[in-house]
Image (tube, rainbow, N blue to C red):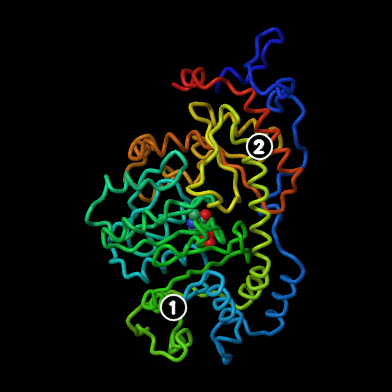
Amino acid sequence: MNGNDEDPAPTRPRPASNGAELHERLALHGGAPIRRTPWPTYDKGAVHVCSDDEEAAMRAIRSHLYFRYDHRNESETECGQFEAELCRYFGTRHALAVSSGTAALALAIMGAAVPPGSLVACPGFTFVATPSAIVLAGCRPFLVEVDDDLRMDLDDLRRRWRPEIKAILVVHMRGFAADVAALAAFAAEMGVPLIEDAVPALGAELHGRKLGTFGVAGAFSTQSDKALNCGEGGFLVTDDSTLFGRAVALSGAYEGRLRRHFPGTEPPVDGLDLPLLSLRMDEIRAALLRAELTRLPQRLALFHRNYAQVSGALADLPGIAVRNPVAPGAYLGEAFVFRVPGGDAGWFARALRAEGIDARNIGADDDLNVRAFWNWRFMYDDRDPARIRATLPRTARLLAETVDVPLSSSLTPDDCDQLIRAVRKVAAAAPAAVGVESVRA
Ligand SMILES: *Cc1c(COP(=O)(O)O)cnc(C)c1O
């Protein structure tokens, strides 16, 4: 706890910045909060679903045909049509709808024939599903530092490189594109496949190319917090027919059902050579997703509009560091992630929550956020978080400084304005960075 949690005495000089906000007493200190209604998030029902989507799901329910492989042709099933539409959307040869984003990631690794027991490199800042998918695929996660903008750091990957690393799993974390072209070139140099965890960046582009199409495969989720939402689900996209065939067979296309995914050609793999893991998607969810996919461009535009409003207003605010995209516009915009360099991000997030904004300090000690690698205890023999943090010291320091605010596509410009005012208000009252360092030490 730092000294700033006390109300300043009225006569004490206040920090010189941000004019008007200085008059406002923080809600944390008993002042009026900027916002009194809940901050909209998917788990409170703030989702981008309309009556056409509901109707599509009802159509599938009324059909009584819920399994994707039945008497119909692929081109008549919801799953088959969803996959064809994904191929058009991403410009890929193949797409496979599956049961979750984690399943899609594991199938991509297994589809790429990464030998079980290999190391798979991934960034130290990601959702726990990324290292979990590596474990599900029979491999071992190998963590790499992130840079100041919280992207996988290629220089650190080079430095740490070991011959046991047989794949690179890059993540476009919180919707921000990684430097995926450079990573793809490095993967080619090392002779290993690059797989994209593009889960948080569905629809986002880098240099006019969709994220998820830079590596040998891109994995996506359709869980409720993602840009397409059917509760639980996912898919992978790829141009590699062998990878695709293996993923299809592993996902559960048994007894010739694999053939349906290769109309007019012989499948490049024999399904009997692979175990069947039953990670399929069903018809009801695919119907819902197909309807939502038609409005994905509008949803992406809302994410971008909201993010532009928030980041534009706060980019130059003293005391915080807003993430820089790797190229202009190379993000989805479904979260406002910023650092409080040298400051107390735990206090900052608490103060924002008191103002009515959902905010979390990712590296908070008291939160057990599963985006902080020291909470992935299944990976470590050591149970001491301090020693685990020391394995990636830079990422640990950056995450301790990081605040994460979800930006639902349902936010209005007024909601965004409240967020902007709240961040300004809290930043104006935040203790100066130097002082905080000494308090925290
Ligand atoms: C949500 C998420 C996943 C997992 O998706 P599920 O469908 O929940 O399995 C994987 N990676 C990242 C970065 C995510 O945010």
Percent x, y of residue 134: 38, 59
Viewer-proximal residue, 58 or 259? 259
Answer yes or no: disc 1 within 8 Å of ligand 1.
no
Dot 1 falls on a residue whose secondary structure is helix
Q: Residues within 10 Å of mark 1 (few under 14, many from 20)?
A: many
**Among the 4 quarters of the image, the one containing residue 228:** bottom right
Residue at the limit of the structure toward the top, as seen here: 11
- Quadrant for the C terminus, please: top left
Residue depicted at x 38% and y 74%: 243
Q: Between marks 2 and 1, how big is the CA–CA gap?
A: 46 Å
Residue depicted at x 46% and y 82%: 253
Going from the N terminus, do you reach mark 2 or mark 1 first? 1
- Judging by the rendered image, the residue that carries numbered circle 2 is 313
Percent x, y of residue 47: 69, 58
**Among the 4 quarters of the image, the one containing residue 296:** bottom right
Numbered circle sitting on residue 248: 1
Dot 2 falls on a residue whose secondary structure is helix
